[in-house]
Amino acid sequence: MTGLIPMYLKTVYKKEPVFTHSKVVYTIGQNTFKEKLGADFLKLANIHPSLKDKDLDPYAEANNTGMFRGGATYADAITMGAEKIDKKLSEEFGKIRGKKVLSFNAESDLTDYLQLYTDLCQ
């Protein structure tokens, strides 16, 4: 359910002093469950009157892919946390304008991550 956190930070909590200038890096990994989250998922996820239905649109599938899509939609940067991720998500978020995207690299010495965080701080 961590896919909801970027959305909450960028909508409901965006005016909270602790989160006003926060940046979100979201990692898309392998699908870990195939089940649907239930017909009332979007209703339950709507935790605040300031949230609009359109804010929850990326989560409409109410499944693992929907959680990844929602988190990535609201993130300032996206990292790929596994070699094999959902093909739809890879195509959708692999190269997206306006966001830094870091591909999975098992051989990485983490320099790319340091640069990503540095770029987000500027």
Image (spheres, rainbow, N blue to C red):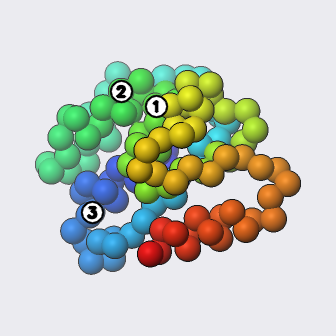
x and y, in percent, of residue 36 in the image: 48, 23
Amino acid residing under circle 1? Gly
Query: Which one is earlier in the sequence, the residue at label 2 or at label 1?
Result: 2
x and y, in percent, of residue 99 in the image: 46, 51
Amino acid residing under circle 2? Ala
In this view, the residue in front, 7 or 99, is 99
* Residue position marked by numbered label 1 in the rendering: 66
* Residue position marked by numbered label 2 in the rendering: 60
Height in image: 2 above or below 89? below
In this view, the residue in front, 27 or 118, is 118
Residue 73 lies in what quarter of the image?
A: top left
Please report the residue visible at 15 percent of the width from the left and 50 percent of the height from the top.
50
Label 1 CA crowd tier, 10 Å (few <14, some 14–19, many 20+):
many
Give SS at disc 2: loop
C-beta proximity under 8 Å, tags 2 and 1: yes
C-beta proximity under 8 Å, tags 2 and 3: no
Query: Which one is earlier in the sequence, the residue at label 2 or at label 3?
Result: 3
Quadrant containing the C terminus in the rendered view: bottom left
C-beta proximity under 8 Å, tags 3 and 1: no
